[in-house]
Amino acid sequence: MKNEIKSTKHLKNKTQESLIWYSTLPLALHFVRFANSIVLARILLPSDLGIIGLVSVILYYCDTLTNLGFGSAIIQHKQISEQHYQSFFSFNLFISIVLFITAQYSAEQVAIFFNIPEVEYVLPLYSGLFIISAFAIIPTLKLKRRLEFKAIAIIDVLKVAISISISLTLALNGFGFWSILFASLVSQIVMLILLFIYTGYTVKLTHDLRPLKELFNFSSWSFVNGQFKLLSDNIDKLLVGKELGAAELGYYDKAIGLMKMPADQISAKLGSVSFSSFSRFQTDKKNLFSTFKQINLINSLVMIPIFIGLIWTSEPLIWVLLGEKWMPIVTCMKILGVSYIFLCLSGPKLTLCLAAGKVKQQTIIRGILTCLLIVNLISLPSYNITTIAIYIAIYNGFSYVLSLALIATLQQSWTFTIFKDDLIAVIPSILMCIGIYMFEKVFGIQEYVPLLIWDIIIGTTCYAVCIMLLPSPQYQIFSRAIRQFSIKKKRIQNDGK
């Protein structure tokens, strides 16, 4: 009994530490990446970003074929041996090599299909990421199972620093889209080296794939679920690239990139920590729900004001940061902001259900929604990026509603509590918007630069004041987490002395 209590306490401490490291550090990193994306957008053409965006979608989709859901299954499964890792690595490497070779011979046909000639030269080189990812997957999975997200966060920082320095240097010297490609390849290689050094992992090949059989039930459903997610996430880009060309895809990809960056750097990081943590607590409903409630609330209180702020300031933001040539994406960006609010709110809920083993139910629901989305997008009489963004927002809205329904299959009483927490997180964001609106009405600032600066200052101040003064205990979650982390840090220091 004592060992069980000690183990639970250790998992909770590791979860809290991982949340702090894997959310605060990427949050700071987000602003650096955001600044880099702005500079690159000013240097490069929309068509440059469209070419890289299209190839990235193709390669990212193909890369999931190397995983077949076994990565998630290894994190979720209670007991994993070294044989599981060896079998998965051997399987993953074989598929990666096949895909790499396929990319070399299919690049010309892909370029012809999308009518973007540059793809013929970009795809073969960029597909080297298949091989790099195959070697990086096992040390990454080991760190995630051990909840060592501090190490992952630090490696991410180094990887991003190298990527930014290379991409900016090459872009300023006129390399166009090649600057992003080379930066991605080099930074991924550096990440791989750091993972090997930190984990001490040594490559071991095996022809025995039997250890993967016991993971197959979860992995197969996880793989299908992942394919539906990839289709829903990328079908819009493929249609824009096919029907509207590289320039329009560049506009659309930049709008998505600006809105997706907070989701990737904050909400997705919380999702990675929470999946590992929920998987360890999957048989302990009390600790599972308390851990989920904390992560879900942090996610809502952080992501909602960010996206509402981006929606509110989108016009001055685009004009100031990207320049007049990017103003056509303003309306699309506002719609995508609403879409990503729903996406981020549903993220922790779907992660909880996945970790609790509800992978089959989640896959069926996502499959139905994805099929409806694809049918509606393909049957559009005419294509433009705004209309496509509206359909994506509707899809993510339905995903949020159905994520609450999935929670009810675990325990019905949880659904109302979770929905109430989401509503509570919306209140300070609404008050923030009221504060900004009143300021704009009183002072009537028209110029974009001072308007953007003052909107950010007023919005941040209003939100911080609301969090500190509103009576609900949910708003004190940040101060409690920081206090607990400080106490733990002092205790470690005292033990060292």
Image (spheres, helix red, strand yellow):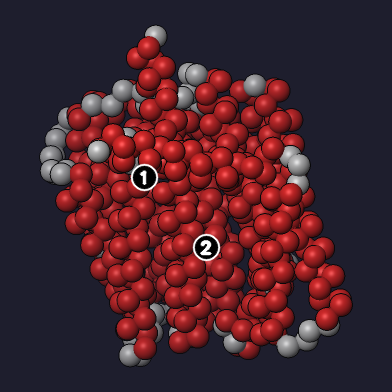
Amino acid on which disc 1 is placed? Phe
> Residue at point 69% right, 22% down?
412
Sequence-wise, the earlier of marks 2 and 1 is: 1
- Give the mark toward the camera: 2 or 1: 1
- SS for callout 2: helix
Q: Tag 1: Cα neighbours inside 10 Å, few (<14), some, or many (≥20)?
A: many
Please tell me in which quadrant of the rendered image residue 411 appears: top right
Please tell me in which quadrant of the rendered image residue 72 appears: top left
Residue 204 is left or right of residue 415, and the answer is: left
Residue 40 is left or right of residue 254, and the answer is: left
Please tell me in which quadrant of the rendered image residue 211 appears: top left
Give the position of the N terminus as an image quadrant: top left
Identity of the residue furthest to the top in this view: 1
> Residue at point 23% right, 51% down?
195
> Residue at point 50% right, 78% down?
38
Asked if the residue at tag 1 contacts the one at tag 2, i.e. Cβ–Cβ closer than 8 Å, the answer is: no
> Residue at point 13% right, 39% down?
205
Q: Position of residue 189 (x, y in %)?
A: 23, 62
Q: Which residue is mark 1?
A: 149
Q: Position of residue 262 (x, y in %)?
A: 54, 60
Q: Which residue is mark 2?
A: 261
